[in-house]
Image (cartoon, rainbow, N blue to C red):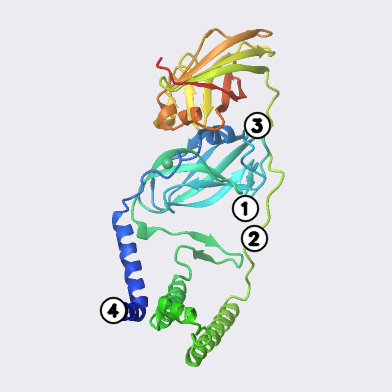
């Protein structure tokens, strides 16, 4: 009796396995979609603190506009320093490209220039060098979008830089993406060939659905498994099914060949997608720095969100110098004695009074001085950089900026290991 019930159950499951499977898939998909809310943050803080601090130094960033209309162009410009402190766990940017980081295709990337050179493809950047970049965007979808600049590095993935909110106004339906072709005509890339794209996708989806339906409604996975398990693997695919498979293969090849021939005769002049990397991107030609820094050790106080670094600074230049700013992972810590007026920069990354010195007086030409700098702000935490206390590599890195009375500015990279402190201040 028990065996009969089990056999009957197995027969039922076998007969309906395909449909049961489809039902479970549909229910799973519906549940997943229903529970997902709109994404606000887009992962910029998810990378390890040491990784964000030790790879890229972004500075002098400017978003040309923060309020634009659909189809309006705007740009992000700035400088990118490839840090000498680049960690060994990530491959150096031998193959990388500057990209925009945004929650979807909210703006089209019209072009990117690095070191004044148009770089529509991957390029090689060198560790220790600084590059000027410019990225041109065209507003596409209306909304309030956090827009980052980022560097995508082969095997390392995208490393996001600072982000700014861009408000795009207008109507999405008005968006156009005009592109001039080599034959002189101009097309709208947003809608170009869209009907045939839809038709071909629909066609292949129907073919695929019919194919899946055909196999899953005939004994299903479990049924076939049982046939194989009971030694009938030779009979598991019937002669009729073999015929259907052969006809489908032939028809698919025929459709591909005919479709290809029609496209080739309609568009006789085509060139393939261009590949290859750009080498020798011109870096900024920086004058020799008159500042030498020796890092003598430091601590990071977790409860106080405070990094202190003991430095031996030598000024071998001709002018007195003051420490005005520290930048790490796009975060700016300013010395209010040097920055006396308002700075235009995204607020979540700007600690206007974040930097102080044990001795704030200018370092005179020829002088060597031991200075303790304190970099303190809640943004260490909100930007999840205090994670450096828990990293496998408790090292920090960043750029220290020196200012002279005549308006010169010198950037010096600063990095080293710090000892985390968990004691209350
Ligand atoms: Cu963002």
Q: Nearer the viewer, mark 3 or mark 4?
A: 4
Q: Nearer the viewer, mark 3 or mark 2?
A: 3
Residue labelled with disc 3? 84
On the rendered image, what quadrant is the N terminus found in? Answer: bottom left
Name the one closer to the observer, 171 or 97. 97
Counting residues from the start of the chain, the first of labels 3 and 2 encountered is 3
C-alpha separation, residue under disc 3 versus residue under disc 4: 72 Å
Asked whether disc 3 touches disc 1, contact meaning CB atoms under 8 Å apart, the reply is: no
Query: Residue 361 at what x, y percent from top left?
Result: 55, 7
Residue labelled with disc 4? 5
Ligand 1 shown in quarter: top left
What residue is drawn where x is 56% and y is 42%?
A: 134
Name the one closer to the observer, 417 or 287. 417
What element does badge 3 sit on? loop
C-alpha separation, residue under disc 3 versus residue under disc 1: 24 Å
Query: Residue 84 at what x, y percent from top left?
Result: 65, 31
Counting residues from the start of the chain, the first of labels 3 and 1 encountered is 3
Most extreme residue toward the front is 1
Above or below, 179 against 346 in this view is below
Residue 266 visible (yes or no) = yes
Asked whether disc 1 touches disc 2, contact meaning CB atoms under 8 Å apart, the reply is: yes
Asked whether disc 3 touches disc 4, contact meaning CB atoms under 8 Å apart, the reply is: no
C-alpha separation, residue under disc 1 versus residue under disc 2: 8 Å
Report the disc number at residue 121: 1
Residue labelled with disc 2? 274
C-alpha separation, residue under disc 4 versus residue under disc 2: 64 Å
């Amino acid at each position: 009796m028990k065996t009969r019930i089990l056999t009957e159950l197995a027969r039922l499951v076998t007969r309906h396995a395909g449909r049961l499977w489809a039902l479970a898939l549909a229910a799973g998909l519906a549940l997943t979609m229903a529970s997902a809310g709109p994404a606000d943050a887009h992962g910029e803080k998810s990378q390890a603190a040491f990784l964000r601090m030790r790879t890229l130094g972004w500075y002098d960033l400017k978003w040309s506009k923060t309020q634009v209309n659909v189809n309006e162009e705007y740009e992000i410009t700035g400088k990118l320093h490839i840090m000498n402190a680049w960690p060994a766990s990530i491959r150096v940017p031998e193959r990388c490209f500057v990209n925009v980081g945004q929650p979807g295709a909210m703006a089209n990337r019209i072009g990117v220039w690095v070191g004044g050179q148009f770089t529509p493809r991957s390029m090689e950047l060198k560790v220790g060098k600084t590059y000027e970049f410019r990225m041109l965007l065209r507003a596409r979808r209306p909304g309030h979008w956090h827009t980052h600049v980022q560097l995508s590095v082969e095997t390392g993935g995208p490393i996001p830089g600072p982000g700014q909110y861009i408000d795009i106004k207008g109507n999405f339906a008005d968006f156009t993406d005009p592109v001039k072709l080599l034959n002189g005509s101009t097309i709208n890339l947003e809608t170009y060939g869209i009907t045939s794209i839809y038709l071909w996708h629909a066609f292949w989806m129907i073919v695929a659905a019919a194919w899946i339906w055909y196999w899953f409604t005939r004994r299903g996975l479990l049924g076939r498994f049982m046939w194989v398990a009971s030694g009938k693997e030779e009979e598991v695919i019937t002669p009729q099914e073999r015929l259907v498979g052969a006809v489908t293969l032939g028809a698919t090849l025929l459709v591909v060949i005919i479709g290809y021939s029609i496209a080739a005769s309609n568009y006789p002049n085509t060139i393939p997608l261009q590949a290859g990397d750009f080498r020798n991107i011109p870096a900024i030609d920086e004058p020799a720095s008159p500042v030498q820094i020796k890092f003598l050790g430091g601590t990071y106080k977790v409860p106080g969100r405070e990094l202190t670094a003991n430095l031996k600074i030598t000024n071998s230049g001709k002018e007195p110098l003051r420490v005005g700013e520290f930048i790490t992972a796009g975060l700016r810590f300013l010395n209010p004695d040097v920055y006396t007026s308002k700075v235009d920069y995204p607020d979540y990354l700007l600690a206007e009074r974040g930097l102080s010195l044990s001795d704030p007086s200018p370092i005179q030409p020829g002088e060597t001085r031991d200075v303790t700098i304190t970099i303190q702000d809640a943004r260490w935490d909100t930007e999840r950089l205090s994670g450096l206390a828990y990293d496998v590599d408790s090292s920090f890195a960043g750029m220290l900026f020196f200012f002279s009375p005549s308006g010169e500015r010198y950037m010096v990279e600063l990095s080293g290991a710090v000892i985390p402190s968990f004691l209350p201040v």
